[in-house]
Image (cartoon, grey):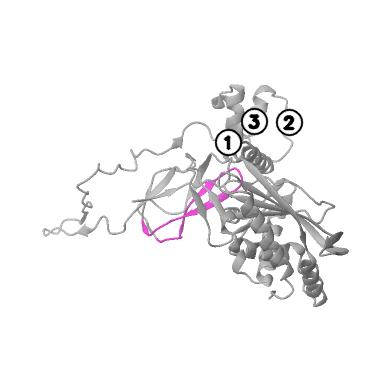
């Protein structure tokens, strides 16, 4: 049988709560069909069937399942054929034969599954409770569905403490902070930066604006960066919770978006194969949904690299934190005219500082250097390569 498991969506994610099953136990499903909704710290997401099969539910609604825990198992559709007895009695399923080697598979009711019992609580709340020796059984949760969040732990010691944000906003803030903290603590960072020539970026933006197309610098950066990541696949992928590295042939670029409740990073899928107009349209949809607080949970998962652009502010440089389990994160500052000397010539040209943060367990600074070189080439080629 094939397991439907809970993937780690961020480095700080420890578990998720089964919100709702979208299919019934024993139902036949097809590959890619959403089968269950799981609530995490950042969003409620749908998890799809990895293969065709008959659903055997393992985790019930309300259960807390840890990362990599089993939510359900998919039994091959032909594993329990039905035969009709000769005497006309009701048809009965015939169990699939067991293999000669190895133990018999466990039934879902008794299978070992890494569930977590006890009250429903966010990872941040569980961590605070452990640090302060607070029994979660005695804490009343103020989050969705009675979920215990971090401020409820503080309330366990200071009953008069008033909430400062709505539950959903507070939960998002906790998730963002928890992910950054875990990234700093667990990922050995290496930062590689360079002041890249951005004349092609400026020229492309001006030409597009003159033709009446409302395209942003971020749209152009997405196009150039996605093309660069295709050339430098070392930095496009994820380091999974078991330590294995999964590099992706497609660029699913997460774009950091500042909202009133914290930074979220919706994913622009297949960015390396999209035309500029498609990139611009999809980026606007994702950013708009994120700022309105209605981003679909499915748009927050599956990123293979992240872009954080602060070019709208007087920012030249900042050091990004890798958004685990991704391998790298790219930070870009403003485009500004700078004095440069090259081949005996001194002049002024548009430049932009780009900084690459890398998980040193997976890759190194040399890959960052190759990415910067590739990005600079694609920035220069923007005026000729847009559609």
Give me the residue at 21% from left, 51% from top. Answer: 97
Q: Nearer the viewer, residue 298 or 84?
A: 298
Report whether residue 269 is seen.
no
Which mark sits nearer the N-terminus, 2 or 3? 3
Q: Do the residues under discs 1 and 2 have CB atoms within 8 angstroms?
A: no
Residue 59 is drawn in which quadrant?
top left
Q: Do the residues under discs 2 and 3 have CB atoms within 8 angstroms?
A: no
Dot 1: few (<14), some (14–19), or many (≥20) neighbours within 10 Å?
A: many
Q: Is residue 39 above or below residue 219?
A: above
Which mark sits nearer the N-terminus, 3 or 1? 1
* Residue 348 percent across, percent down from the top left: 88, 63
Report whether residue 240 is seen.
yes
Which residues lie in the magenta part? 30-53
Q: CA distance from mark 1 to mark 2?
A: 21 Å
Dot 2: few (<14), some (14–19), or many (≥20) neighbours within 10 Å?
A: few
Q: Nearer the viewer, residue 26 or 205?
A: 205
Give me the residue at 65% from left, 45% from top. Answer: 190
Secondary structure beneath dot 1 equals helix
Side (left or right) of 257 relative to 237? right
Side (left or right) of 1 relative to 253? left
Give the number of the disc on residue 152: 3
Give the number of the disc on residue 162: 2
Q: CA distance from mark 3 to mark 1?
A: 13 Å
Which mark sits nearer the N-terminus, 1 or 2? 1
Side (left or right) of 73 relative to 85? right
Q: CA distance from mark 2 to mark 3?
A: 10 Å
Dot 3: few (<14), some (14–19), or many (≥20) neighbours within 10 Å?
A: many
The residue to which callout 1 is attached is 123
* Residue 43 percent across, percent down from the top left: 60, 48
């Amino acid at each position: 049988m094939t397991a439907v498991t809970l993937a780690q969506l961020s480095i700080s994610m420890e578990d998720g709560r089964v919100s709702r099953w979208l299919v019934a136990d024993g139902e036949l499903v097809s590959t890619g069909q959403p089968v269950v909704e799981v609530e995490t710290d950042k969003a409620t997401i749908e998890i799809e069937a990895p293969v065709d099969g008959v659903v055997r539910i393992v985790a019930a609604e309300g259960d807390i399942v840890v990362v990599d825990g089993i939510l359900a198992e998919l039994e091959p559709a032909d594993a329990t054929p039905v035969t009709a007895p000769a005497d006309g009695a009701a048809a009965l399923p015939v169990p699939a034969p067991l293999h000669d080697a190895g133990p018999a598979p466990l039934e879902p009711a008794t299978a070992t599954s890494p569930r977590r019992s006890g009250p429903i609580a966010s990872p941040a709340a569980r961590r605070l409770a452990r640090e302060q020796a607070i029994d979660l059984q005695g804490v009343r949760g103020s989050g969705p569905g009675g979920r215990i969040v971090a401020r409820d732990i503080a309330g366990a010691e200071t009953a008069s403490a008033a909430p400062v944000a709505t539950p959903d906003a507070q939960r998002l803030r906790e998730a963002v902070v928890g992910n950054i903290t875990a990234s700093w603590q667990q990922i050995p960072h290496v930062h590689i930066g360079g002041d890249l020539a951005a004349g092609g970026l400026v020229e492309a933006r001006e030409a597009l604006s003159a033709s009446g197309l409302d395209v942003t610098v971020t749209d152009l950066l997405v196009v150039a960066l996605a093309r660069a990541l295709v050339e430098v696949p070392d930095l496009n992928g994820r380091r999974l919770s078991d330590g294995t590295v999964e590099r992706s042939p497609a660029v699913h670029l997460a774009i950091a978006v500042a909202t009133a409740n914290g930074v979220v990073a919706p994913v622009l899928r297949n960015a390396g194969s999209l035309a500029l107009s498609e990139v611009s349209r999809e980026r606007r949809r994702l950013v708009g949904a994120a700022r309105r607080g209605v981003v679909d949970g499915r748009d927050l998962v599956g990123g293979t690299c992240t872009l954080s652009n602060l070019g709208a502010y007087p920012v030249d440089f900042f050091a990004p934190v890798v958004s685990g389990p991704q391998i790298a994160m790219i930070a870009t500052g403003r485009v500004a005219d700078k004095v440069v000397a090259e081949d005996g010539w001194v002049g002024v040209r548009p430049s932009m500082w780009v900084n690459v943060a890398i998980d040193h367990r997976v890759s190194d600074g040399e890959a960052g250097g190759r990415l910067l070189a590739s990005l600079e080439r694609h920035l220069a080629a923007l005026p000729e390569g847009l559609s």
